[in-house]
Image: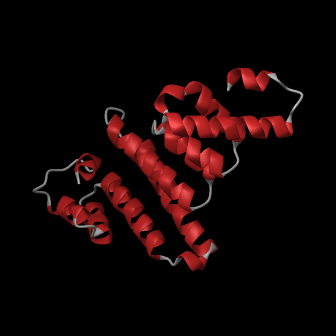
Amino acid sequence: MSVLRFQLPATSGDPFYRMFLNKRYAQASVAFLRAGRKREAAICDAYLLREKARSISTTAGETRVQAFIAAADAFVVCAEDSPSKQVRERLTYYGTAGECYVEGRKFKNAGDNYITAEQYSAAARAYREGDHFDELADVITQHKGALDSRLLERLTKVTQMYYFKVCSEDSLVFEYI
């Protein structure tokens, strides 16, 4: 619940805020819109899109994927619209967008948003799952200290094997990984 507290600039006595905390996102969105609080309404809409995406059966295939992508896009907009002083809020929305992009099978977008959210392990996993080895190599080299040692070791080996297979003549890659 503490994450939600800073995502909506309101007090716990605010009835709209309480609707949000109770996951009544559609009602909260309408209430915020009527009160002229468009940013808060957009936040509620993003959470509502994620809830709807989660409720779609995993067997629904492309419908579920597209729903998560729409939710991710909405969270990116929320992050971009966050006031510059609210860094934690912005990072949270980018991280949530990353989660939704993973569910939407857009691993490059997921990794990019996780990087922006400073969630480097999650970014590395997303890039690996999507076979984005150039980006994965960048995470390994630039954020080595932020990665769990076991994850770092495993991803380094996988990345080295990939580059050895793809461009075995280019030994410079191994100097950086």
Residue 43 visible in the picture? yes
On the image, the x and y values in percent for residue 43 come to 36, 56
Q: How is the image coloured?
A: secondary structure
Q: Eyeballing the image, is 151 above or below 138?
A: below
Above-or-below relation of 163 to 94: above
Q: Nearer the viewer, residue 101 or 30?
A: 101
Quarter of the C terminus within the rendering: top right
Image height of 50 relative to 126, above or below:
below
Where residue 155 appears, as percent x and y from the top left, is 62, 39
Q: Position of residue 123 (x, y in %)?
A: 55, 42
Q: Nearer the viewer, residue 160 or 70?
A: 160
Q: Is residue 147 left or right of residue 48?
A: right
Q: Is residue 124 left or right of residue 28?
A: right
Q: Is residue 17 above or below residue 10?
A: below
Give 37 or 118, whichever is nearer the viewer. Answer: 118
Q: State which quadrant residue 35 falls in.
A: bottom left
Q: Residue at x 51, y 33 (%)?
A: 149
Identify the residue at image location x=53%, y=38%: 150
Identity of the residue drawn at 38% across and 62% down: 47
